[in-house]
Image: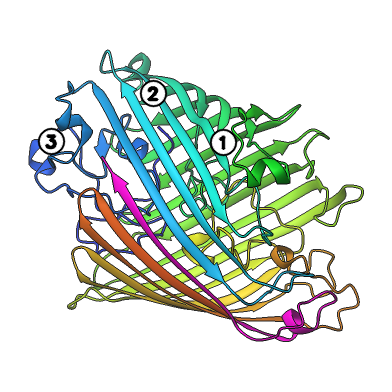
Amino acid sequence: MSLPIAHVAADTPASDFDSHQSGPPVPNLTDSANLEHLSSRPRRSLTAVASQRVDRLADRADWDLTHDLTLHKALNLPTWVSLSIEERVRYEDYRTPWIKDTSTGQYAVPIQSVIWGEVRPSETFRLGAEFWDARQYGSSDPNVLNNSMVNPGNFAQIYAAWIQRDLLGLGVDVESKAGQMTMNVGSTRLIGRYAFRNDQQSYVGIQERIRDPSGDWEFLAFANVPERLLPNTTSGLKNNDVIWNRPETNAYFTGAFLQKRIEDHHHLETFFYYLSEGTADPKSRVLYTPGFRLYREVRRSEFDYEWESVGQTGSMTPDTGGAPIAVGSLMEHVQLGYSFDAPWSPRVTAMWDFASSHFNSLFGINVFEFGPTGILGFFNRTNIDSPGYRVQITPSQDVFIFLSNRLWWLADPASSSGWSTAHLADLSGRSGRYVGQTVELSARWDAAYNISFQSGWQVLMKGQFARDAPGAPSDTSNVNYFYVQTELRY
């Protein structure tokens, strides 16, 4: 199991369903009284999450399996076996071009099909596998098509894990995990399971978790090789060719992560990651990434905060190609939120994100802060300076709605990174810093245990840089993106 992310307190209102801090409290699996209060439905993003339901080392679960509409009950499986099928279908569309040298929009129908199973012959040993089939259909001449969308017929996870309680009488619990696995670490801004994109990044190697049974602290160390997702050719992607993923050549990804409760509801995380990719990888990244995160849990009628600061040194090949360049970068995320004790559980969050030129977010996710990815993905954590706010409400137990508004400037208007996702740069700096403003509106309805619906809209109101940078599309009107998706779980 990957390192658990920040879980909220028992009186926490329902929070953003795409947030790294979303979800209900997670009680101890051995406490029958707590299990009575466990949510009967998944509250994580609309993507395959069954493999993440239970943290065996911490004896915690995100939701129960008491509902009749589960494979476990339908097949009358024993308690030491888990089996699930999850299917997500989405339609997404935008008409106004915003990427360099494009003149039309794009539409797509990504389909994600996932089977996960696990057997636990004993309380301390388990074997698991997660089969992932990610396909996409849509525009015959797409603006964006890559292996974050298409990765048919591959295993995201094949692993074995062992748990040792009270190791050597030291009062700590240890989990050792080996094989092919996904990872969800800390805020997920640098390492996370993707919530909106169609497939998953996986790694081949080992993980060690050491945990204080009281939950006051936890330590993770890992050493692995990232997998290259295939196909990676235009024809293979268009045809949804089935090609086995394979470990990157001469690549290594290692790191250490420590999480500590410093007060009743305050937490501190510190981490260091090292990534080295061989010359076979187009980015050829050799990056040293230290950082920390300080936050307070989301609680009703109280303020909460989050501050994450990350540095990065090393080298990498820029998106424009050429020889590797030296990297000396910084990423900052600061937010302040308040959750009201009122009908519909309103919550307001103010936030600011900064990432200097050439900062690379490794294997992180950004949908919960920057908006939908898929064929869109207006921004990532490179060369940005962006304040914003978010308002969310929960009209009922099964309905979640949020509105987000952000302004976007380039941290360095003359950098070769430019507006990286649009492939627009102006080394002269004459196009200015202001890229534009985004507004996002999204709603989710959990109709039943095994079916959820979500729809969203995001608009980019183009600023000077988006209109005037060399190669910018001649159509300067707003970019309106829309999606609707459904998730089935059994």
Instruction: Give the amino acid type for the residue marked by disc 2 in the picture.
Output: Gly
Please, what secondary structure does the residue beneath circle 3 have? loop
Image position of 283 (left or right of 439): right
Q: Residue at x 64, y 47 (%)?
A: 238
Image position of 271 (left or right of 34): right
Residue depth check, mark 2 versus mark 3: number of the one nearer the observer? 2
Crowdedness near tag 1: few (<14), some (14–19) or many (≥20) residues, C-alpha within 10 Å: some
Colour scheme: rainbow
Q: Which residue is mark 2?
A: 128
| Residue segment shown in magenta | 461-490
Q: Badges 3 and 1: C-beta atoms under 8 Å apart?
A: no
Q: Which residue is mark 3?
A: 31
**Residue 429, above or below 355:** below
Q: Position of residue 149 (x, y in %)?
A: 57, 49
Crowdedness near tag 3: few (<14), some (14–19) or many (≥20) residues, C-alpha within 10 Å: few
**Front residue of this view, candidates 67 and 19:** 67
In which quadrant of the rendered view does residue 391 lie? bottom left
